Amino acid sequence: MNKKKNEKIGFTIGKFAPLHKGHQFLIETALKEMDKMIVVVYDTDVIDIPTEKRANWIKKLYPNVEIKYAHNPPSQYGLDEKSVNIQMKYLTKIMEGEKPTHFYSSEKYGASVAKYMNLVDRQVDNERKNVPIKATIVRENIDENKKWLENSIYFDCKNYNSKID
């Protein structure tokens, strides 16, 4: 693939467990601002829906987004230097061959990722003012929070034997 001069390439990471309107707001913001958008979907045990299925939710809604998989990620998380270095080495390997220019996030770790990878730190709706939801809240009560999900995602969550029930 020929990289265009000054091509803006954004990427984000997440579990998307489940993909909700806040994630969509972030992805849609990036798609408006970037020439190319990459979404890295992480394995997780917080929801019993396979990584590939969660990635397909994104691909179905945003066919121009490139998906990368983060299978078997390191278990050490945090914003301390050791945890950041472990996670960044893993993420750098996943992004090998890509030349991103911007990192999109609505989480505190976004600044660490952007700094480590020497990217523009593009924070989107950190305070959840535009879309006041988090996946942890959706998982607490999927039925009460289904307004934050596309119908097909809500039904997928209900059909899987998942921890979110």
Image (cartoon, rainbow, N blue to C red):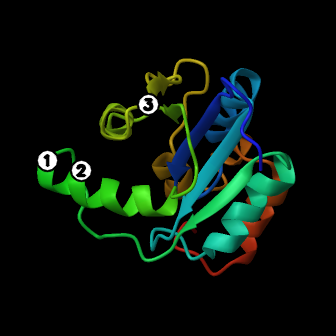
Q: Residue furthest bottom?
A: 161
What element does badge 3 sit on? loop
Labels 2 and 3 touching (C-beta < 8 A):
no
Q: What count of labels does the image hold?
A: 3
- The numbered disc on residue 84 is 2
**Residue at position x 33%, y 53% in the image:** 88
| Residue type (three-letter) at the residue carrying disc 1 | Glu
| In the foreground, 125 or 80 | 80
**Crowding at label 3, few (<14), some or many (≥20) Cα neighbours within 10 Å?**
some
Q: Is residue 18 above or below residue 65?
A: below
Would you name the residue on which mark 1 appears?
81
Query: Gap in Å between the C-alphas at discs 2 and 1?
Result: 5 Å
Q: From this viewpoint, is residue 31 visible?
A: yes
State left or right for residue 38 relative to residue 96: right
> Of label 1 and label 3, which has the lower sequence position?
1
What element does badge 2 sit on? helix
**Crowding at label 2, few (<14), some or many (≥20) Cα neighbours within 10 Å?**
some
Q: Position of residue 122 (x, y in %)?
A: 49, 24
> Of label 2 and label 3, which has the lower sequence position?
2
